[in-house]
Image: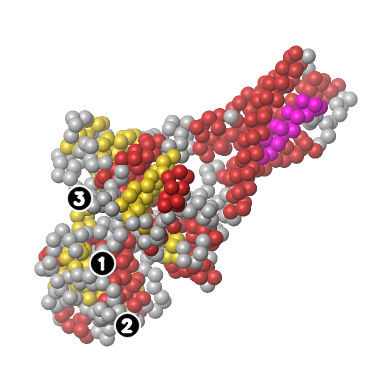
Amino acid sequence: MHRGTREATSVTEAFEKERPGAQEQDAARNTEYPIYVIVGAGPVGVRCAQKLLEHSTDTQVVLIGEEDEPPYNRVRLSQYLSSDASQEDLANPVQQKKNSRLAEFRNRRIVRIDRKRKVVYDEAGTPQPYSKLILATGSRPLIPDIPGVNLPNVIPFRSFRDARRLTELRTRSKSILVVGAGALGLEAAAALKTQSNQVTLLARAGLLGGKLSSSSENYLKSALLAMQVELKCDVHLTRLTGTSLLEKAELSNGESLAVDAVVLCTGITPEVTLAKDCGLETSRGVQVNQYMETSDPDIYAIGECAEYDHRIYQLVRPGFEQAEICSRHICTSGDTSTTPGYAGSRTDIELKIAHIPCALLGQTAPDACGQTTLYRYENRFKGLCRELQVREGKLVGATIVGPWEERLRIGKSIVDGESISRSALQKFQQHGNLWQDQATLGIKQQPDSYLVCQCNSVTKGEICKSIANGKRTLHDLEAETGAGSVCGSCRPFVAELLDVPAPNLVMRHARGILVVSLLSLLLIALAALVPAPEVSRSVQVSWFLKNMWYDNFWKQVSGYSLLTLCLLTASLSLRKRLKNRDLGHLDHWRYVHSIIGCLALMVLMIHTGFRLGENLNLALMLVFLAATSTGSLVGVFMARNHHWTDMKLREHRKWWSRIHYALLWALPVLLFYHIFAVYYF
């Protein structure tokens, strides 16, 4: 596939038409402008193409991808697997102006580089000349060398094609084994878990490869177990067995697991085949200098295939930083005075495990010299574990398990080397916040310098400026600023600045709960405002109503029916406290709760005949109507919460919920006295 403007067509005709034997070596020199070719259309390759277009005005940029799909955001594949992101959400196109000279090819595998002629060739032998070549070939999955690894349903998790296969397995497999407990393995295990399957996570060296302390690891383990993901720690996979299909997985401790699918998240191997074959210097990766140049000054390497200072970075953010430096160095013709050299990157890890936020920022382990001090806050009831590493009064690292309002500011403080007072650290150990007064500030109250998107270093001020310039959708803001386009964790903050619904915040059965809640409010208004009807003189109607409202037997039937419905509504509270049991999604229970509440109001009208009563009965009636009124209002706010992003409206829901709970505590006492009075007198 080829996408580009008319200017791009003539420049890439060689790639479409020429064959080996033509004068390829003169193609790049005969063009009026340089040709920059990027091999690899992953997030880092796309970012490099974007930056080359930004930093130059007279260049041809050619982006060549091996996969058949258009460029996509590999970082969010686990969200696609868990159905929290669609294929459209993963789209990662090069954002270009209408007249920019960009040509994109997909389903083209480059197999050879001719450094002398400065031409690359695909599998069909089609040549593409270049002035500068950027290798962004990334990495391939590291497949363990064990028997049975080639059986059906043994799948690595690396590409969009893998994610599609795993999505199918997720629904039809009964027992899935995820091998590897790094960031990808943790995300995959959580994404694959459904109510109808069993997911086991195999952790050979602890969660996240031993990067967590024992305390923070225990909290993350508890969170995974609450999701019913089974953990097998300190063991590794030795063999997979089966005749024609996968049947069992054998572990190093002698245990054998019956499985019908295995997901391999066992690491990566930098893709350096092209570089090796053409004679570039390689070790684990393609060796590069501080400007991402390889041993050939006309060839650069960035991302997971590049090795700088004996280190390979397996995260997308370092790849973005390398793409920026590489593109500037190319577009300034190697002018080092205007291009800062690469000095390595931070390796922050942010996990997207369903509802469990987890982050490792900066230096999370004590240094060898013992110069760092660890400060920890734990809240077992809420599942929170927060650890801070402090050196000479400055914050240098943090490990966070569970939500934290100060998360973004913590990251910024580590980057800025902000000093932290001893009193603030003592407060943190007691209450879990460093800046307690500022912790309640929403994103709108933060200063313009506040860093909203860590992946792309986008501030609140940049986002607000784009909004003021007419970017009024999440998609437009992502395209303009890059905020939320990588891991997606900052999208709710961007949505709040935009005052639009954040994606994936819509409650299940939202429309049904809204309708039932509004119907309940209507019934409450009728019960409170409509006068009690007089019994008709018609014999039939009079007999029916008199039996329903005055006959002791039918009064007891309606009364105990009402009591039963009230007890059933209390089951929602019980469900909220049984978080470790798989009893269905909480939204399903909320829907049933609202329906039962509405039925209870109907039975109440039958039981009372629209009569409010007197004394104790009046008090019981008013408390019951008030409790159902506040509950119905909570239902309305919950059903429309994804539309009402204003913080004050969210506070209304919180207060109505508190009033609802308080009134519910009063109901059992009044009901007891009501029943006692009826039978006693």
Any mark on residue 343, and which?
A: 1
Comes first in the chain, label 2 or label 3: 2
- Which residue is painted at 50% across and 32% down in the image? 577
Dot 3: what SS? loop
Q: Is residue 16 left or right of residue 441?
A: left
Q: What residue range appears in magenta?
A: 613-630
Labels 2, 1: front one: 1
The disc at residue 58 is: 2
**Element assignment for label 2:** loop
Q: Are marks 2 and 1 in contact (CB under 8 Å)?
A: no
Q: Residue 465: in sight, yes or no?
A: yes
Examine the structure image and report whether residue 376 is included in the region drawn in magenta: no
Where residue 129 sits: x, y (%)? 21, 76
For the point 55% across and 51% down, the residue is 642
- Callout 3 crowding tier (Cα within 10 Å): few <14, some 14–19, many ≥20: some
41 sits left or right of 296 in the view: right
Q: Is residue 609 above or below residue 219?
A: above
State the image quarter where residue 14 is shown. Answer: bottom left
Q: Residue at x 67, y 24 (%)?
A: 669
The coloring applied to the image is: secondary structure
**Residue 64 in view:** no
How would you classify the magenta stretch by its main secondary structure? helix
Distance from disc 2 to disc 1, alpha carbons, whole Å, reads: 29 Å
> Is 618 in the magenta?
yes
Disc 2 crowd rating (10 Å Cα; few below 14, some 14-19, many 20+) is some
Q: Which mark is residue 142?
A: 3
